[in-house]
Every structure is written in structure tokens, then in C-alpha cells.
Image: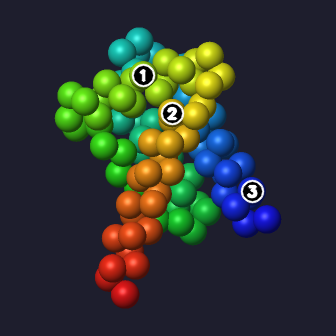
């Protein structure tokens, strides 16, 4: 049951991220505000913020491709990027305990 709830929240985050960037005034998927929005949502859910790996050329291309796929309602790649960031943050937090 918990896994299903997490999947739903992840899909909602992916959808919200894509929708926000779709209405965002920049056509180049300038997502800094969108990534900030994800962290605000996570913090409101009492979850830690995440870092999406978009600093590298490859990371940015992967993120933009995920957003383009999400434009066609295919959220799998964007879900995977968000899940990876969440898993990485969880691992980091667990290592500090």
C-alpha cells in the first residue's frame, strides 16, 4: 500500500513539474523555478528537498528529454529522474544517522 502511495505522489510531482514548465514563459525548459517548486512541495509534505542532476550537459539533455516526453503524457523518464533524486537524498540522510 505504501509503495502505491509513493508511486502516486511521484506521478503527481512529475505531472506538476511538467505542467508548471509547460506554462512557464520560457520555451527552453528553463526549470530553475520548477525545480524549486518541487522542493517546496516536498518540504510541505515534510520530506527533504532533492537535487536534480542538470548541471552537466548529459544531465540537462536527459532532463529536457524527460520533460518533452511528459509533454506527451509519458511521465516514465521524469518519474525515474525524480525517483533517483529522492533515493539519493534518502541514502544521504541515512548515512548521516
**Label 1 vs 3, first from the N-terminus:** 3
Q: Residues within 10 Å of mark 2 (few under 14, many from 20)?
A: some
Q: Is residue 2 visible?
A: yes
* Residue at left offset 45%, top offset 16%: 25
Q: Secondary structure at mark 3?
A: helix
Which callout, 3 or 2, points at the residue further toward the start of the chain? 3
Q: Quadrant of residue 34?
A: top left
Q: CA distance from mark 1 to mark 3?
A: 26 Å
* Res. 19 in view: no
Q: Position of residue 26 (x, y in %)?
A: 40, 16
Q: Which mark is residue 22?
A: none
Nearer the N terminus, badge 2 or badge 1?
Answer: 1
**Which of the image's four quarters has the C terminus?**
bottom left
- Kindly identify the residue that appears in the image at 22 percent across and 37 percent down: 55
User: Which residue in the protein does label 2 denote?
Assistant: 77
Q: CA distance from mark 2 to mark 1?
A: 8 Å
Q: Which mark is residue 65?
A: 1
Q: State the image quarter where residue 19 is shown.
A: top right
Q: Name the residue tied to disc 3.
A: 4
Residue occupying the point 38% across, 60% down? 88
Q: Nearer the viewer, residue 20 or 82?
A: 82
- In depth, the one of 35 and 52 nearer the eye is 52
In the orientation shown, which residue stands out farthest toward the left? 56
Mark 2–mark 1 CB contact (< 8 Å)? yes
Task: Tell me, yes or no, whether the two marked residues, 3 and 2, touch with CB atoms within 8 Å.
Answer: no
Which quarter of the rendering shows the N terminus? bottom right
View extreme (top): residue: 27
Instruction: State if disc 3 and disc 1 touch (CB < 8 Å).
Output: no
Amino acid at each position: 500500500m505504501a509503495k502505491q502511495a509513493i508511486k502516486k505522489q511521484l506521478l503527481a510531482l512529475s505531472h506538476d513539474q511538467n505542467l508548471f514548465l509547460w506554462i512557464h514563459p520560457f520555451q527552453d525548459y528553463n526549470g530553475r523555478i520548477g525545480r524549486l517548486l518541487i522542493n517546496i512541495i516536498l518540504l510541505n509534505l515534510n520530506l527533504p528537498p532533492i537535487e536534480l542532476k542538470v548541471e552537466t550537459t548529459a544531465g540537462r539533455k536527459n532532463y529536457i528529454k524527460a520533460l518533452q516526453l511528459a509533454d506527451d503524457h509519458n511521465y516514465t523518464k521524469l518519474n525515474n529522474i525524480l525517483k533517483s533524486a529522492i533515493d539519493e537524498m534518502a541514502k544521504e540522510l541515512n548515512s548521516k544517522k
